[in-house]
Image: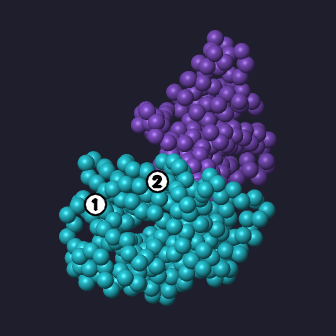
Chain colours: A cyan, B purple
Amino acid sequence: MPMTSRSANPVNGVLVELNEVSFIRSGTAYLDGASLALRPDGRTIIVGPNGSGKSLLMRIAHGLLKPTHGRVDTGRPDGSPLRQAMVFQRPVLLRRSAQANVIHALALAGIPRRSRREHADHALASFGLSRVAHRPARILSGGEQQRLALARAWALEPEILFLDEPSSALDPAATKAVEDGVNTFHARGTKIVMVTHDLGQARRLADDVVFMCCGQIIERTPASRFFSTPVTAAAAGFLRGELILDTGPPASGRGDGGASF
Amino acid sequence: MNSPDPFSLALSLIATRDPTLWSIVQLSLQVSLTAVLLASLIALPLGALIALFRFPGRGVVITLLNALMGLPPVVAGLIVYLSLSRAGPLGQFGLLFTPTAMVIAQTLLVLPIVAALTRQAIEDLWEEYREQLRSLGSGRIRAIPTLLWDARITLTTVVLAGFGRASAEVGAVLIVGGNIEGVTRVMTTAIALETSRGDLPLALALGLILLTLVAVINGTAYLLGQASSRHMQ
């Protein structure tokens, strides 16, 4: 797992802590002073309009990007690195069999060679992919590919799993499979952090909701309250489906994938 | 002059297993395949390194590699000739006019092609894989074998392009090999010699055999690639 710009271990039980984190490129603050503590329990769903910095926030929390300002603390009290994984909007699969994809991830995680195959087969079975284990990953259907990405993450036994709109390109059946997968992780005690555009999905999965707009975290509220009585007017407007006109950084040229960073 | 038809001459040369022809074909393949192997061993990782790392002068290196793809074989031959000649820096090894010298010259010709095309292929693939590989904890160095393996179909074509250049060139092997019969004579230099001697049917026959060899090697690689891409997309 990327360990860049990580310093101290966060305090008691927090897995990842963002402290006044900003991401500024050529004068534009794509993320502006965001603070967020991610604890081991529950499913944190991040929602907000396009260009609000959701994906960026998650990439910084995962360690894929370094913030330009602020601090990200991660790790366990004993100093060992946190096991984390991420599932992207469009699964990036190697040009190998489904099983070889999982084995490759296990190799990178330092799992001894002799036990990789067994781990991989177990993970594939958990996501109903045993039948296609030896098929080339890139010719699987979209839903199977995303389940393979989940199985690959599953094999790594992460303590925290990041998901960036994992079902936005999938049909309802495949979406259901992804949501079931997320809950399988949740049941194993993996902390879930997920960005979604789909408010229905947020309702189905969220334990707490982080609402972002214009590069800032506007509020973080338990799901039971967020969908009925959100704290801020902006969130209320967002829930009503109002168009929130971005007053922050220009959203032009960057999708919500944030991949251009 | 009652010259024989080059096709039947080629066939009869092959059919009679003409020992001179056979040794020429063997040496041609040996020199070019060794050169391609050596060049690939260096150029595949080198191209991947240049693709993955940013360093000062990177643009110059890429431009240079691209330019060297068009390095004239006679110039490569001249450089190797000067290095290996008695007065040259590597003169003490007495390699001039040996197959080893020919391998060195062809390696020099093939290396830029494989490195430059590998750089491009790996850079494109890295763009696609970067976030996922970093998320899985792969550093850039560790990503190199992953990327080279995943680009294997493209890279097969790249290596074939290198082989095409090696097996087709005449200038470099002629200068550093000297076209000595039974020692450094290969197909291309033999063709050049027979043409200048006026034995056109023999030259044509040799040309046909060379073409067939190259076609067979490329055809085999193409079929392998097809089979592989069907299975591995």
Residue B203, position in %: x, y? Answer: 62, 41
Callout 1 touching callout 2 (CB < 8 Å): no
Residue extending farthest to the front is A12
Residue B146, position in %: x, y? Answer: 61, 55
SS class of the residue under badge 1?
loop
Instruction: Examine the rendering and report whether any part of residue A250 can be seen.
Output: yes
Q: Nearer the viewer, mark 1 or mark 2?
A: 2
Nearer-the-camera pick, B97 or B49: B49
Q: Which residue is mark 1?
A: A253
Question: Crowding at label 1, few (<14), some or many (≥20) Cα neighbours within 10 Å?
Answer: few
Location of the C terminus of chain A (image quadrant): bottom left
State the residue at coordinates (43%, 32%): B57
Q: Which residue is mark 2?
A: A72
State the residue at coordinates (39%, 60%): A35
The vertical placement of B88 against A29, above or below, is above
The amino acid marked with disc number 2 is Val
SS class of the residue under badge 2?
strand
Left or right: A47, with A146 as reference point = left
- Mark carried by residue A97: none
